[in-house]
Amino acid sequence: MPTTYAYKVRDRSGKVVSGSLEAENSALVANRLRQMGYVPISIDKTNAGMKREIAIPGISNRVKLKDIAVFSRQFATMISSGLTLLRSLSILVMQTESKFFSGVIDSIRSDVESGSSLSQALGRHPKQFSRLYVAMVRAGETGGNLDITLQELSAIIEKQVELRGKIRSALSYPIMVLALVLLILTAMLVFIVPIFKKMYDQLQGKLPAPTRLLVAISDVFVHAFPFVIVAVILAVVGYRKWVRTPSGRATRDRLVLRVPIFGGLVRKTAMTRFSGTLATLLSSGVPVLESLEITADTVNNTVVAEGVHAIAEGAKRGEPMARSLSGHPVFPPMVTQMMGVGEETGALDALLRKVATFYEQEVSRTVDALTSLLEPLLIVVLGGAVGSMVISLYLPMFDIIKLVGNNN
């Protein structure tokens, strides 16, 4: 099925002309334009991303970071072996398991074939290739070391995957235990407590305060359970919408940093991303201001991003980066001091790499400590929640036994 392509060309007088043509692929469009006497500047699919998503129903349009890392490493190996860009991309199209990602690579190959640079072609797929990725590839193209850049990108992404895996493994256990606690408590409130309530109603005795509270909560769950579910769903949806707003996300990020233990982990993770990303971009030859803008997008915390933006504003005025950071307490003194020394010695990227390595190790230690600390703590929480409910249910039993003993 022919696809509509929007193009920009130069005519014989040097004037830029734009228009659109329908063809099977961009190469045919380029050949037709050359036959017409034009020099192609750019050839883009019209709403290519939207058509691709609609044309492939049932296939996820999300590409895993691990797939990007494998793609980068294989691409680097092929280029360093002497294969051309087009041939390397054609091979990657055939051997990529994800059908959607294979289609993305094929689109990149078509764009490169039509005259676009690799970084321009990658930039047309921002959901799959971040600004960091595109900027580093552009720097690699300019410096003539694209294979080395792709290998470095692969290493960076693999570290990100490893870091995410560690954090998820640390959080998955407490989440599962808390979900189990909520399930057990809900089942007891809906099925067990009403049985005891009927029995105590028949005895017509005065219930202790903990038992009365438990029975009241059970009544709410039994008689208004659908409303409770709806309220929870509305709360979750409202929270997600609130977090998507700039003010909501900023408030959430500030509160997260203040949470004991977990706030420190989030802060260390942000420092790892900040120092590692900035070091990589600067060592790759990306301009300072662009490096700072990209770094602000990758730290994944608005409080840290505000500090990075402050560095960029200070750099525009010619101020040292370390001075701009000193007014943001979210950055530890070590980061500020190391950046100051790096600027003075001209080895900023090397010192930032050392900072990134240090915080990677700190994150790993914190995750290990959390795992060992949370296991006994959650067992106590689970036992305490269920135990307190059981005790509340059986408290009236002791009064009944006393009454029976006194009557005898």
Image (cartoon, rainbow, N blue to C red):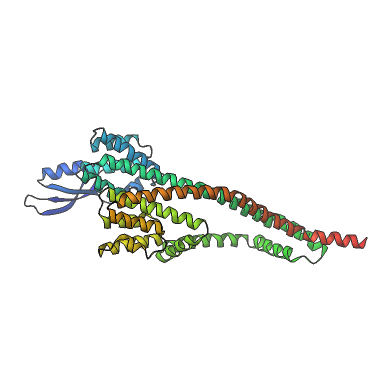
Residue at the far left: name it. 13
Query: For residue 341, what is the image quadrant?
Result: bottom left
Residue at the far right: name it. 408
Where does residue 155 sit, x and y in percent of width and height?
36, 42
Q: Is residue 284 above or below residue 301?
A: above
The reply to whether residue 269 is visible in this rendering is yes
Q: Where does the C terminus fall, quadrant-wise?
A: bottom right
Would residue 170 be found to the left or right of residue 193 on screen? left
Q: Is residue 206 above or below residue 124?
A: below
Where does residue 311 sit, x and y in percent of width and height?
32, 61
Where does residue 368 sit, x and y in percent of width and height?
52, 47
Question: Which residue is drawn at the image coordinates 24% and 33% (left, top)?
Answer: 83
* Front position in the image: 371 or 122: 371
Question: Which residue is drawn at the image coordinates 70% and 57% (left, top)?
Answer: 389
Where does residue 325 sit, x and y in percent of width and height?
35, 62
Residue at the far top: name it. 81
